[in-house]
Image (cartoon, rainbow, N blue to C red):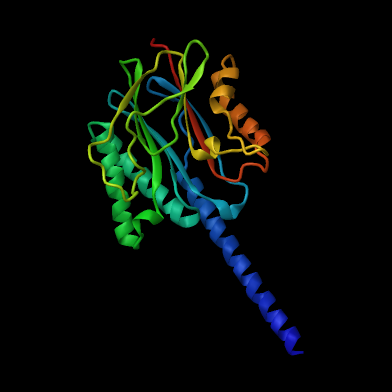
Amino acid sequence: MIISGVAAWCSAVRQRREQQLRQATVVADVAQRALQHPLPEHLGAVDLYLLYETSVAGAHLGGDFYKALRVPGGVRMMIGDVQGKGLGAVESAAVLLGSFRESAYGEDDLPGVARKLEASMRHLAARAGIVDADRFATVLLAEIPDDQPLMRLLSCGHPPPVRQGADGQAVYLTFRDPSPPVHLPVELDHDHVVEEVAFQAGDRILMYTDGVSETRDRLGEFYPLAERLTAWSSAPDRDITARLVADLTAYSDHGLDDDTAAVLVVRRPRT
């Protein structure tokens, strides 16, 4: 009788905890979806195509985020990934998105935007009692001037974007001196470094999170992103992100188990 009572109590506790987890997961899912509005397909001098997939298991919600804004003289963009999962990661993503919306309009350059992102995360940490190493984010900032055939990039520990030019060859862009991730306890000995890369009419640049770059096959090999984009050089721009998510799913040994975000940026011809 006692054993039966203990078993019933344990079962009831387990069911309550499972219900609480499901409720917390739903809240995180709704909050994350509310933050991630669809990108405009046309913005300034570029076309934008989005891939955004939440992870398969609800309990694995994370903090991938993205934003593109029309600013005077061009377009500014951000894509990033908060370390960790759940509501804490979604909260950090919301803070970074809010900071970017403000600083993208108010700051003169990308280093100014990066400094604002850092300050916003430190304010969140102080308010919530977060230890520095417990919550950080990799971020890639981009600026596309209307009147110059180039893209300015600033990486805070984020995976390098892939550029595809007129020859169809897709190559990873390199950063001479990337900054550390936002809110990682590492002091900069100089200001953030901005890279400039050619971005002509018809060129494609793919920005993505590690849900793309860290996908592995059953042998543990990382997804060959640049190779795939080169093979798809003749595919229409709007088909690339759909091909990418289908190919990532087929390539992975166990499906996409992390949030996955990518933005294909295409320079339109001047009219």
- Residue displayed at 52% across by 57% down: 27
Comparing 14 with 175, the one in front is 175
Examine the rendered structure and indicate whether residue 154 appears above or below residue 122. Answer: above
Q: Which residue is rendered at x = 30% and y = 35% of the image?
A: 104
Pinpoint residue 86: horizontal percent, then vertical percent.
50, 55
Q: Quadrant of the N terminus?
A: bottom right
Q: Tell me which corner region of the image, top left, top right, bottom left or bottom right, holds residue 234.
A: top right
Residue 260: x, y in percent? 54, 39
Q: Is residue 232 visible?
A: no
> Along the horizontal axis of the image, is 113 left or right of 242?
left
- Residue 136 appears left or right of 9: left
Q: Quadrant of residue 65?
A: top left
Please indicate whether residue 249 sits to the left or right of residue 98 in the image: right
Q: Eyeballing the image, is 49 above or below 14?
A: above
| Residue at the image position 44 percent from the left and 56 percent from the top | 88
**In the displayed structure, does residue 245 sit left or right of residue 147?**
right
50, 121: nearer the viewer: 121
Residue toward you, 69 or 255: 255
Give coordinates of residue 186: x percent, y percent. 30, 47
Placement of the C terminus among the 4 image quadrants: top left
Please say whether residue 31 is visible from this viewpoint. yes
* Residue furthest to the bottom: 1
Q: Quadrant of residue 141?
A: top left
Number of numbered discs: 0
Residue 146 on image: x %, y %: 32, 19
Relative to 184, does residue 164 appear above or below in the rendering? above
